[in-house]
Image (cartoon, rainbow, N blue to C red):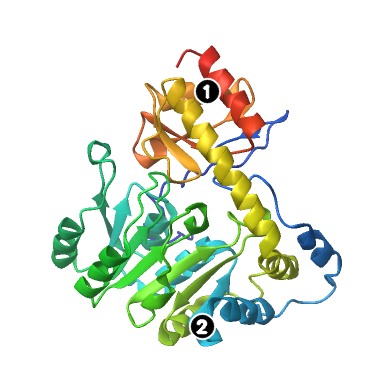
Amino acid sequence: MIHPRPELDMLPPVVHGGFHSGAGIVLDFSSNINPFGPSPRVWEAMRDVVIGQHPDPHAAPLREFLAAHESVSTARLLVGNGSVELIYALAIAFVRPGDPVLVVAPTFGEYTTAARIMGAQVQEFRLHSENDFALDVDELLVKVRQVRPRLLFLCSPNNPTSTYVAEQDVKRILSGCPDTLFVLDEAFLRFLTDAWCSNGLSEYENLLILRSLTKDYALTGLRVGYALASASIIRALEKVQPPWSVNSFAQAASIAAVSDETFFRDSLRKLFLARNDFAQRLVEIGLPPLSMRMTFFLVPVPSATELTRRLGERNLRVRDCTSFGLPQHIRIATRSVDENNVLISALQDLNV
């Protein structure tokens, strides 16, 4: 009998929100996505895609476009089939069996899974609700010196806690772990109104920044993300990335979406207004979010699993955060004002 890698034997599946395969129409608050959809230019661009031939194997048109958009050379940027593909490429390219990998948690589960597949010894630096999930950089750097990780994963703004790390603190972390590849995942950056720009950190050779086009530009089904890093790190990722991983539709749609800045900014304006109203309504019904700065909220509840089940019976989906190790929290993403009010009414009816 042929056996798979031993690392797979005890590898649990990662739980995600945002997928519905059952009957009926579901209002989905479980996935942190711009609810106002993509630019109309996206549909126009995809109509012109030729599907009878291969896309560029390295997504060169999109890569060149994004490099110009980010004011970096193409040698410092790599496009992937969502940022998840790039996370797995990082593990393949940089993690050896037995290597320590450090993850600031609770957070996106794919960091741990990708590292464990490659045989890493994954440790968590866990943040706690009693401190509002704030990151103590001094304590993190003590942990870094103890563990000496090959990779350090930090999602900022973080999913699901909304924790956002200040620029000076990111610089302190980078300076404190010169022999560690620091992965800064900024997938939700555009859902902040007061974000700082990390592009200016390019002088740090131990930094890789992950960005996503699927959440803010509402291209989730097309799966597009990209990495910004030194040319040597990007070359290593290129070597393990399969050819044609970003399909023709995704490339054309991404260029069209990012080019339509007017539509994008208008959709964010509507989203931020809906967020402000939604947060206030949650406070009024006795379910105040732990943070209100993001367009998704972590909300304490008596039982996340029970509330998720009861809302599901009403075709309303929220994210049960038990899989994050937070069984008394749900995560709720902002939708339109009318849709948000449907959820508010349901929560009031259920007497949460």
Residue 294: image location, x then y, percent: 46, 46
Using the numbered discs, state the Cα–Cα distance from disc 1 to disc 2 in whole angstroms: 46 Å
Question: Considering depth in this image, is 237 or 4 the residue closer to the camera?
Answer: 237
Image vertical order of residue 163 relative to residue 62, above or below = above
**Count of numbered badges drawn on the protein:** 2
Question: Considering depth in this image, is 12 or 247 the residue closer to the camera?
Answer: 247
Image quarter in which the C terminus is found: top left
Question: At x 19% / y 69%, what residue is drawn?
Answer: 148
Dot 1 amino acid type: Arg
Dot 2 amino acid type: Val
Compared across the picture, whether 321 is left or right of 176 comes to right
Q: Secondary structure at mark 2?
A: loop
The answer, for residue 34, to whether it is visible in the render is no
Question: At x 70% / y 57%, what residue is drawn?
Answer: 263
Residue at numbered disc 1: 309
Q: Mark number for residue 72?
A: 2
- Please tell me which of labels 1 and 2 falls first in the chain: 2
Compared across the picture, whether 10 is left or right of 77 comes to left
Image vertical order of residue 21 relative to residue 75, above or below = above
Q: Could you say which quadrant of the image residue 19 lies in?
A: top right
Residue 84: image location, x then y, percent: 51, 61
**How busy is the neighbourhood of tag 2: few (under 14 within 10 Å), some, or many (20 plus)?**
some
Which label lies toward us, 1 or 2? 2
